[in-house]
Amino acid sequence: MTDDAEFMSINHITNGLYKVIADYYPIVVGHPSIGKNGKGVIVVDLDNLCMPDIAELSVKLPAEHFFETCNYKNGDTVKSFNLRKFFCKSGISALPEATFSRDHLAAIVCLICFKDSPYIVLYISLPHVIFDGTAIAAFLNNWAECTHNLDNPDHKLKYPPVNDCKVVRDYFDTVTAIEPPHTKHFKDLGAKSLVKVPSSLIAALLLAAPDIPAFEEQHLLHFTAEKLEQLRQDVDKAQTTNLALAAVLTKTILQANIQMFNSMPTWSYVMFPYDCRHRTEVPMTYSGNLSFSAVAPLESQTVLDGSYKEIAQAIKEHCSKVSSEYAKLLIYTVENEIGVLFQAGISLCNLPDTSYVGLTNLRYMPLYSIDFGYGGPEILSNGYFIHEGMQRIYSNKQDGSIDLFMNVKDDLFEYLKKSDKLLKYADIIF
């Protein structure tokens, strides 16, 4: 606990936020508009800035009231922050999400203090439409660096962001587009019902669309490093941990889906996002969204009958289609074939006819290095997702393990809690 009134001062981090936006990220205070070519564009108008929403909140309970604690035989104690419990019992029923649709807020920051507690929560929401995971992690570290150096007017970021999207356009102008297999799958699946929208109207349609409410049924699994490696060895030691975990989740969620709906889905989908910076000449410091999705459409009966090793191999075969040639076609699809996106959207979820695992790996993101001058975070938590079926992996520095935040229906999770295969490797936190 600290008696320092300036510890994690809202004024201090706000000044750092304004500095990093003004000097390096002006797009954050821009407004969405339609360009002359009919495409969406962010316009920064000095007379009409979209200022961040910054608030300081106080909770009349200790932060520890919202912790879940897991004790292990080796002496490790792992704490997790239960967001659902927080919203239920803190007096704060929800936190706002950054959006460009309703109020055009592109950055939301909440500093949450607790009664008689050494913990402070820093809640940050940025829009996925302009940032991907890599860009958000860079933004947070750059914001922290600027905050840490407010007293030095000559300070420059060690790794300043590249904001000019021309570097992306110039690169993809040299690339020949190739259609990813999953795009063709969704086209064939909706061949008779795909929504046809002229390309010139897509940006305006998306800007006019209402916000999608967050899916609030969040759950958390904890995998120790030892159990995670055991899982990989049991599935296929030649595969990555990510693929082995995806294989177990794919089959386990399909089995739970069958039990819940009492029917066999036709398709089991697995989605991995990938950062195209690693596969292009675009700088790693590019500040925009350059992430794309690789999707494995697997026949559910094949998943049910196959071994975990076979499932992992099938996922790898589909989700290794991550070249820049595939990415260029995906850009074209987003800008010109909204019907394909709609078909994918209604397919990538857990329903009687589809089973879905969307797995985002953030365990190697530089999140624990975010230091505003008071030390890095002790605990990482995840806000609610928009899409059901999405899951995110975070590293947990408390014991060198991982946390898996799952966005699945409570009813479906009740069946997952009974899975011997899943419980062999994971501890259910909430």
Image (cartoon, rainbow, N blue to C red):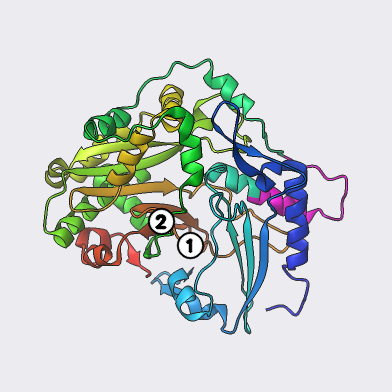
Q: Is residue 275 left or right of residue 313?
A: right
Residue 54 belongs to magenta span? no
Residue located beneath label 2 in the image = 225
Q: CA distance from mark 2 to mark 1?
A: 8 Å
Say which residue appears at 48% left-offset and 55% top-offset: 395
* Contact check, label 2 and label 1, Cβ < 8 Å: yes
Name the one closer to the observer, 179 or 306.
179
Q: Return the x and y of residue 234 as percentages of the image width and height.
A: 25, 49
Query: What is the span of residues highlighted in magenta in the rendered image?
Result: 140-158
Say which residue appears at 31% left-offset and 53% top-offset: 230
Decide: is 377 above or below 181. below
Say which residue appears at 59% left-offset and 48% top-offset: 137
Amino acid type of the residue that numbered disc 1 sits on in the rendered structure: Asp
Residue located beneath label 1 in the image = 399
Amino acid type of the residue that numbered disc 2 sits on in the rendered structure: Ala
Q: Return the x and y of residue 147 as percentages of the image width and height.
A: 76, 55
